[in-house]
Image (tube, coloured by chain):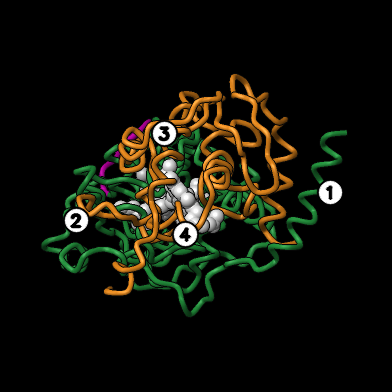
Chain colours: A green, B orange
C-alpha cells in the first residue's frame, strides 16, 4: 500500500527532474585540474612524484617468482611495457569465469591465485597497490577505453543507479557533488568531477598510496553512509560506470592528491 | 527514464521506511513549522556555535555567511546573511527540519528526519543530524540574521 503510493509520488517527482546533470564530454576535467599547481607539478615529474616509489616496487615485483607455480608475472606476460600497455585503460573488464566484471586489482589477484598459485594480495596492501600502479603507468597518456561489451551493460546501469542514489545521514548522492557541484567549494575542498584516470594515487594526507575504492569509501563516510567493503560488487559496478563516464580521457596513473 | 528515477526506485525497492524513532512531533502549516520543536525556543548564541561547527552544524561546508572569523566557507549554497529577513521563524524551522519538503532536489540535509534515508552509517542510524533543542538554537540564531540595507548598499 505504502509502497504503491511511493511509486506514484516518486514517478511525478522524476518527471519534474528530467534535467539530468551529466557532464558534457567536452566539459570533463581531470582531477589534476582541481589540485594546487605544486601538487600537480609533483604528479607530472617522475623524480618528484611520491607514487613512483610504489610504482618501482611494482616493477621489481613483476619479475619475482612466487607461489606454488614459482612463476613471476613476467614469466608469462613478458616485459610489462609491451604486454601491459593499454591494459589498465580498459579495466574493469568482463571475466568469463566469474560471470562479472573484475577491476585491475581483481585481475591481478586472479593471476596470483589461479596462475601463480599464491595467496591473493589483501585490499590496499602495498603489493597490490604497487602492481596496480606499475601496470596502470603502462597506460599513461592513453585514453580510458572501457570495452564495448554488452555483458557489461547491466553492471554499468547498476553503477549509474548507485551513483545517483542519495545515501547516508547527510543524504547525498555521488552525482549531487560530482555532476552538479564540481568546481565549487565544500568547506575548504574543491569538488572534482571524480574521474578514475589517475588511480591508484599517492595522497599526501594519507602519506601513502590508495586505490579508487579507498576514495569511494572516504566519500561514503563523508556523507555518513556505511561504506561498502573493499571488492564489493557495488564498487566494481561504480568503477564500470566511472570508466564509461571518463572514456577518452588520458590515463595519468600514478596520480598525486592533497 | 532519467537516472534519478532509477535511483529513487532502487531506494524504494531495498528499504522499508525506517520508523521515525524518538523525534518530537511537529506540524507543517503551509511552508512552515510554526511551533518550536519540544515547545521551547532556543538560544541564539548556542545556535551560532552550532552553525560554525563543521562537525555538528556543517552549514559552512555549503553556505557562506556573516562569519568573518571563519575561513574556508563553502559556495554550494546561498549566503546565510539576511536569512532572518527573508524567511519567518516557522519557515526557517521547516528549512532546518526537512529541506526536501521545500525542494525535493535540495542538497541541504534534512536535519531532523530519520526516515527515507539509505545506508546510514551504524553510528548515526535512526538519529537526526541535530537534536530538537539544537534545531531550536539554530533557528533562534538564524532569526537574528537580518538584512542591513545600509551595509549592503556600500558593498
Label 3: few (<14), some or many (≥20) within 10 Å? many
Q: Which mark is residue A52?
A: 2
- Whether discs 2 and 4 lie on one chain: the answer is yes
The residue tagged with tag 2: helix, strand or loop?
A: helix
* Residue B54 in picture, x, y percent from top left: 32, 41
Report how far apart the C-alphas of labels 3 and 4 lie in the structure.
32 Å
Residue A86 versus residue A169 in the image, above or below: below
The subunit carrying tag 3 is B
Q: Mark 4 and mark 1 in contact? Answer it, CB < 8 Å.
A: no
Please give the residue where the numbered disc 3 appears in the rendered image: B137
| Tag in front: 2 or 1 | 1
Instruction: Please give the name of the residue rendered at 68% of the width and 39% of the height, measured from the top-left corner.
Output: B28
Asked whether B144 or A102 is in front, the reply is: B144
| Tag in front: 2 or 4 | 4
Q: Is residue B17 left or right of residue A174?
A: right
**Magenta stretch: includes residue A67:** yes
- Whether discs 4 and 1 lie on one chain: the answer is yes
Asked whether A165 or A184 is in front, the reply is: A184
Instruction: Please give the name of the residue rendered at 58% of the width and 67% of the height, measured from the top-left corner.
Output: A21
Please give the residue where the numbered disc 1 appears in the rendered image: A8
Q: Which residues are the magenta region?
A: A63-70
Label 1: few (<14), some or many (≥20) within 10 Å? few
Amino acid at each position: 500500500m505504502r509502497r504503491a503510493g511511493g511509486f506514484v509520488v516518486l514517478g511525478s517527482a522524476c518527471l519534474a527532474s528530467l534535467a539530468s546533470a551529466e557532464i558534457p564530454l567536452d566539459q570533463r576535467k581531470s582531477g589534476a585540474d582541481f589540485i594546487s599547481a605544486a601538487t600537480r607539478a609533483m604528479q607530472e615529474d617522475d623524480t618528484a612524484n611520491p607514487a613512483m616509489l610504489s610504482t618501482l616496487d611494482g616493477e621489481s615485483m613483476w619479475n619475482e617468482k612466487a607461489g606454488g607455480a614459482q612463476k613471476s608475472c613476467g614469466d608469462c606476460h613478458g616485459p610489462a611495457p609491451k604486454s601491459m600497455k593499454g591494459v589498465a585503460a580498459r579495466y574493469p573488464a568482463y571475466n568469463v569465469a566469474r560471470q562479472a566484471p573484475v577491476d585491475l586489482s581483481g585481475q591481478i589477484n586472479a593471476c596470483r591465485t589461479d596462475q601463480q598459485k599464491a595467496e591473493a594480495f589483501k585490499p590496499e596492501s602495498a603489493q597490490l597497490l604497487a602492481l596496480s600502479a606499475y601496470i596502470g603507468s603502462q597506460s599513461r597518456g592513453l585514453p580510458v577505453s572501457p570495452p564495448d561489451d554488452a555483458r557489461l551493460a547491466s553492471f554499468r546501469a547498476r553503477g549509474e543507479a548507485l551513483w545517483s542514489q542519495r545515501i547516508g545521514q547527510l543524504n547525498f548522492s555521488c552525482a549531487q557533488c560530482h555532476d552538479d557541484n564540481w568546481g565549487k567549494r565544500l568547506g575548504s575542498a574543491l569538488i572534482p568531477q571524480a574521474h578514475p584516470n589517475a588511480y591508484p594515487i599517492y595522497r599526501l594526507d594519507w602519506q601513502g598510496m590508495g586505490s579508487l575504492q579507498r576514495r569511494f569509501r572516504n566519500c561514503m563516510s563523508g556523507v555518513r553512509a556505511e561504506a561498502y567493503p573493499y571488492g564489493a560488487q557495488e564498487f566494481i559496478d561504480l568503477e564500470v560506470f566511472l570508466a564509461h563516464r571518463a572514456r577518452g580521457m588520458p590515463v595519468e596513473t600514478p596520480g598525486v592528491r592533497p | 527514464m532519467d537516472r534519478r528515477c532509477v535511483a529513487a526506485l532502487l531506494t524504494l525497492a531495498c528499504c522499508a521506511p525506517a520508523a521515525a524513532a524518538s523525534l518530537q512531533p511537529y506540524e507543517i502549516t503551509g511552508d512552515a513549522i510554526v511551533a518550536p520543536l519540544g515547545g521551547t525556543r532556543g538560544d541564539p548564541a548556542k545556535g551560532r556555535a552550532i552553525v560554525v561547527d563543521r562537525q555538528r552544524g556543517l552549514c559552512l561546508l555549503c553556505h557562506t555567511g556573516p562569519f568573518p572569523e571563519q575561513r574556508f566557507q563553502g559556495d554550494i549554497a546561498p549566503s546565510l546573511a539576511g536569512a532572518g529577513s527573508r524567511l519567518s521563524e516557522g519557515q526557517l524551522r521547516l528549512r532546518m527540519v526537512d529541506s526536501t519538503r521545500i525542494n525535493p532536489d535540495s542538497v541541504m540535509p534534512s536535519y531532523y528526519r530519520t526516515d527515507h534515508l539509505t545506508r546510514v552509517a551504524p553510528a548515526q542510524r535512526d538519529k537526526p543530524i541535530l537534536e530538537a533543542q539544537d534545531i531550536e538554537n539554530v533557528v533562534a540564531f538564524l532569526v537574528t540574521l537580518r538584512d542591513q540595507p545600509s551595509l549592503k548598499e556600500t558593498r
